[in-house]
């Protein structure tokens, strides 16, 4: 065996060992910026964010999901000690935001009983939860049958293997329902939820601080042209989703024409974009947002510690066999069982609906 061959063999062996070590023994890490931006632009973006500043959170993107989860638990436990909470459900009042009470699109608004959650709104939530459950079906025949049982007509479906969507008609109104992620009880690791989706922000829109969670946004944006073929943008649209489908229901509002009246009802919606993105593309006058959260559903606080936000700070909290409009709940909201659309949201809303 000559020296040249030995050298080549040593180099090849070293490359193989390095690849195996990096692939299988080092934790998966994701670079924060992966879209080829120049240093000057990157620094400018990092400098303009409000608290919590993106620059302060950048190191979190270099963690594994498990490491990020562990730090989140530590942070939440510190909050319990520093800011103990004691909720009195009898004192929690459902206070609708001014946008809903002054909404001029009466087909999007609901009767408000002196700031409380009306029975008709609860019934709407129950219907929306059933529609969200149907979205977990991928066979158009099954979807058609399930919708017909509710007196609803299927218009069309979109299925590209990553995003499952159906469009339907109900009492002359359009429904756009996006499939989410339903977990099997007892068969999950909380830090592995959606870990296969990129957490890197994708910058969109005219402003430098408008960004979205690329893993939540990219797939639904790619199939939006197919979805739009089933929609009439001159009529109002009711967008519904659970879990991953919920955050995509929020994000898809930026793709729907701003002149279209849109109602968004979500269940267990994680955070998915910058505040500026939501302010510019979701919080517009002809959009009604309803976020429903069950008990200690973990998803409302996801992604933990990363610089993503909700479109609005208030949500409808299903707890203690009732529902309240509030903007806070107990610390350590880490239940997977409460996240289930079938075993949590539907069960709780069925008890309240008429």
Image (cartoon, rainbow, N blue to C red):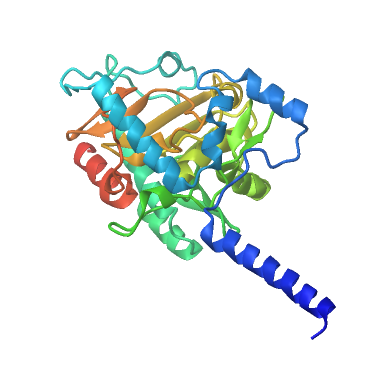
Q: Left or right: where does residue 249 sit relative to residue 351?
A: right
Q: Which quarter of the image is occupied by the N terminus?
A: bottom right
Outermost residue, bottom direction?
Answer: 1
Q: Residue shown at 44%/53% (left/top)?
A: 135
Q: Looking at the rendering, which quadrant does residue 10 occupy? A: bottom right
Residue 75: percent from the left, percent from the top? Answer: 35, 31
Does residue 79 appear to the left or right of 162 in the view shown?
Answer: left
Q: Nearest the camera: 295 or 26? A: 26
- Can you give x and y, in whole percent of width and height, for residue 54 in the image? 57, 26
Does the rendering let one see residue 20? yes
Closer to us: 300 or 155: 300
Left or right: where 191 falls relative to 90: right
- Height in image: 199 above or below 179? above
Residue 42 in the image: state x and y as whole percent. 71, 29
User: Going 18% across and 24% down the picture, which residue do you hit?
Assistant: 89
Give how far across and how far down residue 35 sits, in percent.
72, 41
């Amino acid at each position: 065996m000559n020296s040249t061959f030995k050298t080549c063999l040593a180099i090849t062996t070293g490359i193989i060992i390095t690849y195996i070590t990096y692939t299988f023994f080092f934790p998966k890490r994701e670079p924060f910026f992966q879209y080829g931006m120049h240093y000057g632009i990157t620094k400018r973006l990092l400098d303009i964010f409000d608290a919590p500043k993106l620059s302060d959170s950048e190191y979190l993107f270099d963690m594994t999901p498990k490491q990020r989860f562990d730090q989140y638990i530590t942070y939440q436990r510190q909050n319990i000690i520093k800011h103990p909470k004691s909720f009195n459900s009898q004192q929690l009042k459902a206070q609708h935001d001014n946008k809903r009470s002054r909404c001029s699109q009466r087909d999007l608004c609901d009767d408000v009983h002196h700031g409380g959650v009306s029975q008709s709104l609860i019934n709407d939530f129950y219907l929306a939860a059933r529609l969200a459950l149907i979205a977990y079906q991928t066979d158009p025949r099954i979807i058609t049958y399930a919708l017909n049982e509710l007196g609803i007509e299927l218009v069309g479906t979109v299925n590209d293997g990553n995003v499952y969507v159906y469009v339907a008609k109900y009492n002359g109104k359009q429904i756009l329902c996006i499939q989410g992620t339903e977990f099997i009880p007892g068969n999950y690791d909380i830090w592995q939820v959606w870990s296969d989706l990129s957490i890197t922000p994708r910058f969109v829109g005219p402003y430098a601080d408008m960004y979205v969670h690329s893993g939540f946004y990219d797939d639904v944006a790619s199939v939006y042209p197919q979805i739009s073929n089933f929609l009439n943008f001159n009529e109002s649209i009711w967008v519904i989703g659970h879990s991953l489908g919920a955050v995509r229901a929020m994000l898809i509002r930026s793709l729907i024409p701003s002149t279209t009246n849109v109602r968004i009802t979500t269940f267990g919606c994680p955070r998915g974009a910058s505040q500026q993105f939501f302010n510019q593309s979701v919080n517009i006058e002809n959009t009604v947002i309803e976020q429903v959260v069950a008990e200690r559903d973990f998803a409302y606080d996801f992604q933990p510690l990363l610089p993503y936000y909700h479109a609005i700070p208030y949500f409808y909290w299903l707890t203690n066999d009732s529902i309240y409009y509030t903007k806070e709940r107990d610390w350590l909201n880490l239940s997977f069982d409460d996240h289930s659309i079938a075993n949590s949201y539907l069960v709780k809303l069925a008890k309240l609906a008429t």
